[in-house]
Image: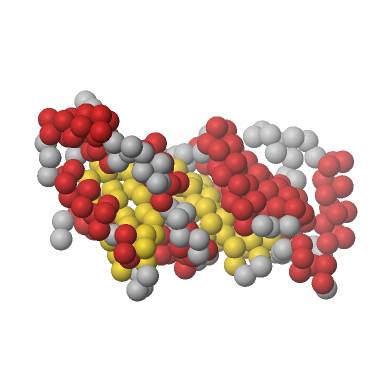
Amino acid sequence: MSTEAGSVNFIYDFHTNMEKHNLILAYEGEFTQEITKSVLAMAERNLDSDGAASSTRKKVFNVMVECLQNICKHHDKVLDEEGRKSAIFMIGKIGEEYVVITGNLLENDVIDNLKARIDKVNSLDKDELKAYHKEVIRNTEISEVGGAGLGFIDMARKAGHKLLYDFKPGGDGISFYTLYIRISNAKRERNK
Amino acid sequence: MVECLQNLARYGRQEAITRYDHSVFVISRQDDSYSISTGNYVGSGKVNSPANKLEAINSMDTDELKMLFKQIIQSSYASEGGGAGLGLIDIARKSGNKLNYQFFDVNDEFHFFVKKTNVDLEN
């Protein structure tokens, strides 16, 4: 078969995979402010039509914004093999839970710092996170790229789950960084 | 892209069963062309109509497409889905390439219809 047939097959495989992994939306490519806005708008509409509770929608939306900001701020420093700024953003629904997944390339020398920050957030419970949030607000200066280091704290508080991450070494001093965030559905929390 | 998305919006949601109202839209770039691909479910009984249209369009050259386009504009009334059947012709004319497509068997009731159009980059 020709490569054309192969790439038509790919579309079907891609679709099947999206369904298999319960993905609602996936975007891969360059992230600019404009594109970020459009992706958020699409995601929001999908959540609407999905009938998610409004408190859940807000939480998912918040996490998405934080994730997209992270990508926007950091992804343009490292280019892929073909010189493109490339990152991926996905949302999905697994059972009653929503997931937000991001992936982008980064330089290996920032990994330790990133890991330490996520691990710190993951080690705290709900009340500790709240206290830590306050503490960071009081003490920190705004960093170079405009963040105060609140992103992960916010995400963890909204998500109600630990933040899962992975770094896949890609050679040449860069790695592929994945962040996987589960977000509880409000309905289930109320029943606890 | 606009024609493709309109097609999806019109036909992708005809089947009111949750799993089967999902569509996929992919843009990709190769060295010398862009590809615009769409995929959506169609009822197995409705496969022939788009397949025939696509075959007819793919068999025509630029001038024939232009003629067909005019002919349809003059004679046609809008179809149920809201189109006059011009979309695919338009896609073929704008892209200048054949439309690749395939129907994948999903089950007795549904096929998954993938259509892929290449648009060459101008140098």
Nearer the observer, A86 or B14: B14
> Which quadrant would the N terminus of chain B be assigned to in this image?
top left
Which residue sits at x=69%, y=61%?
A183
**Residue A57 seen:** yes
Left or right for A25, reference A16: right
Left or right for A154, reference A134: left
Nearer the observer, A34 or A172: A34
Can you tell which quarter of the image residue A82 is in?
A: top left
Residue A165 coordinates in the image, percent (x, y)? 59, 60
Which residue sits at x=78%, y=36%?
A141
Residue A48 coordinates in the image, percent (x, y)? 65, 51
Which residue sits at x=59%, y=37%?
A37
Nearer the observer, A121 or A5: A5
**Residue A163 seen:** no
Which residue in the rendered view is the most extreme toward the top?
B123
Residue A96 coordinates in the image, percent (x, y)? 66, 67
Residue A104 coordinates in the image, percent (x, y)? 50, 49
> Which quadrant would the C terminus of chain B be assigned to in this image?
top left
Count of numbered marks: 0
Nearer the observer, B3 or A96: B3
Left or right for A43, reference B29: right
- Is the residue A45 above or below the residue A18 in the image? above
Can you tell which quarter of the image residue A147 is in?
A: top right
Left or right for B7, reference B89: right
Scheme of image coloration? secondary structure
Which residue sits at x=70%, y=52%?
A57
